Image (cartoon, rainbow, N blue to C red):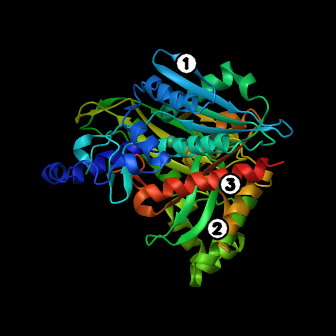
Amino acid sequence: MRINSQRIILLFTALCVPFACASARAASDTDIKTQPEAVQLLADYLKIDTTNPPGNERLGAEYLAGVLRKNGIEAEIFDTTPNRSCVYARLKGTGKKKAIVLLNHIDVVPARAEDWKFPPFAGEIHNGELWGRGALDMKGMGIIELESMLRLKRSGVKLDRDIIFLATPDEEVGGDHGAKWFKENKPQLIKDAEFLINEGFHIDTDKNGKILYWGVNVAEKSLIWLKVTAKGDAGHASMPIANSAPNRLVRALTRLLDSAPNPIVLPLVQQYFAQISVNESGKTKEAYADVKKALNNPELRDILLKDKMKSAMLINTVSLTVLKSGYKTNVIPAEAYAELDCRLLPGTDHAKFAEEVKSKLADPTLEVTVLESEIAVPSSANTDLFAAIKSVAQTETPGVPVVPVVVQWFTDSHWFRELGITSYGWEPVEQDPEHIATVHGKNERVSMKGLEDGADRLEKVLLKLSKP
Ligand SMILES: [Zn+2]
């Protein structure tokens, strides 16, 4: 999962008191060897440092392939670049139905040991939780996928589809040496796949652990990065230039950033809010129940747009991230530029959006160029895989909504959606806000029960989807 992680890491770094962090360290408070298989597998996997950059995912790939082979499942390792590798394995079914891919990434984002309560690459258990960088993002999910495959293999059940296990490097910095490489170099290995399950969304709970809804990420926002450049005369700062490059840039950016957002309600987003409205009360319930209608009511509109995460499902966002000009206090510079990170809802035309930004900047002397543009194709929520997840959810937690989610971050799913494979970000593990904040942050950990439940749920979904 790629989010804007640097800021979170820096913030946590500043908050950590070194003495407290060091003094709290102790080895696991539980013997790992007495734990269920999934816990033991993840504990060992977390000890392999696959921090990206540089990744060094080959060691992680060898570990996963070793577990598969030990359990009688043939596994292949493909090196994408030196020391960086994919693992590919296939559990054969009858072939009556098309295959399903269980995708996961081997790399993790950096972790500074001094910021953590327990070491990030030791795989220790404390208070019923397994600690380590990647416990949630996404070595934990990788092991849930692996464990469900091992269970199906041992059960001897003949499924109607092949189950493909695919672990890739380099997700955290874009996937060029991972999923993209696989898509371009080994597409024949997954050409028979209809579905794919990857990281993405989870079973959402409140801070007390009450399950609110099962979220299935069926779509991600697209990305467009824009650079806005102003050019003008340079001069001595003792004689201001009203229309200098920095002045014009600042005025234009103010117009853009102050402009009111223009919400777009996609049918699946309308459905998402309506379904989770059961967890709300009062005005929030009213706003969620019919988002389209609520956006015409100033009070309800405010409720919808003040939530940073949920409002991102309703608007194309613009974040001013880079702002540069000048080199000396008494010199008016001849150039100033800004970079904008914009995230667009599925279906938004990128060129039209760039034009919209230009018209809000309202200064034709500024140059607007595209630095990067990635289009994320959504998957349908009306599939057998969605129905299988829903059926397992309804048996386990009757009455709890199962909802399609559009997420604002990027995962490797988009490479596979481009191949026409219906790809869902679905992590069958309960997550509360405190644990979600550890993803790309400090003290990342997963509950041992969560791992077990996750493997159970995934196994059930695969059976439901693939039983003769
Ligand atoms: Zn991830």
User: Does residue 155 appear anywhere in the picture?
Assistant: yes
| Real-space Cα separation, disc 3 to disc 2, in angstroms | 11 Å
Please, is residue 5 above or below residue 167 in the view? below
Q: Which residue is mark 2?
A: 396
Total marks shown come to 3
- Residue 87 versus residue 415: which sits nearer the camera? 87
The spot of residue 159 in percent (x, y) is 78, 43
User: Does residue 260 appear anywhere in the picture?
Assistant: no
Q: Which residue is mark 3?
A: 460
Instruction: Assess disc 3: are there few (<14), some (14-19) or many (≥20) residues with their C-alpha within 10 Å of its C-alpha.
Output: some
SS assignment at label 3: helix
Q: Are marks 3 and 2 in contact (CB under 8 Å)?
A: no
- Residue 190 versus residue 289: which sits nearer the camera? 190
Q: Earlier in the sequence, mark 3 or mark 2?
A: 2
| Real-space Cα separation, disc 1 to disc 3, in angstroms | 33 Å
Q: Residue at x 63, y 77 (%)?
A: 278
